[in-house]
Image (cartoon, rainbow, N blue to C red):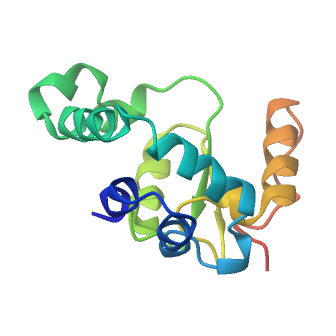
Amino acid sequence: ANGLAAMDDPTYENCRRRMERICHDKAAVAREMIVMQMTEYALPWAREAFERRVRGMMDIEACKPFRVLHRLESIEVPTLMLWGRNDTRGLYSSAQRAVQRIPGARLIAFDHCKHHPHLEHPQVFAEVVARFLQGLGMEVYDDVLPT
């Protein structure tokens, strides 16, 4: 409903409100993100594509080959999960349970953050990802950032 309301009337104000609902700090919602959404939502096929994507994600049978929840123990690559602790769409407790099942995985949560840690804490997010991709130790981080 949050996305569809903005798509039906993609004004600056509606797109701003949508992003503010999924970000912990309203100040983290960049003007450029709002303008990008306005542009995307104004496309004539945007609503149909959104609805098709949501229907696809809700089609349990069609998604079965792509679901990994029942196969987490078989992941054999270094895994870093970055999570907004205050995310109401993806619960932090679910991430905690999942990371325990992935051999050698690491979970870092961002405090004061909902669904978009890369938008709400871009510098710290980029630093953490860069260290991980370079194979540098993640032990320099607490499990929760930023403090």
Looking at the image, residue 77 sits to the left or right of residue 139; the answer is left
In the rendered view of the protein, which quadrant contains the N terminus? bottom left
Up the image or down, 101 lies above or below 94; here it is above
Closest to the observer: 96 or 22? 22
In which quarter of the view is residue 113 placed?
A: bottom right
Residue at left offset 77%, top offset 67%: 142
Q: Is residue 35 left or right of residue 136?
A: left
**Residue 96, above or below 77:** below
Q: Is residue 92 left or right of residue 25?
A: left
Q: Nearer the viewer, residue 10 or 18?
A: 10
Q: Viewed as shown, does residue 124 lie left or right of 30? A: right
Q: Quadrant of residue 143?
A: bottom right
Looking at the picture, how far across and down is residue 35, in whole percent? 65, 53
Q: Which residue: 24% across, 19% down? A: 65
Residue 12 sits in quarter = bottom right
- Of residues 145 and 10, the one drawn nearer to the viewer in this rendering: 10
Residue nearest the observer in this picture, 91 or 76: 91
| Residue 78 percent location from the top left of the image | 65, 30
Q: Residue at x 65, y 79 (%)?
A: 26
Quadrant where the C terminus lies? bottom right
129 versus 10 height, above or below: above
- From the top left corner, tell me how far across and down residue 63 is, in percent: 21, 27
Numbered circles on residues, count? 0
Residue shown at 47% from the left, 60% from the top: 96
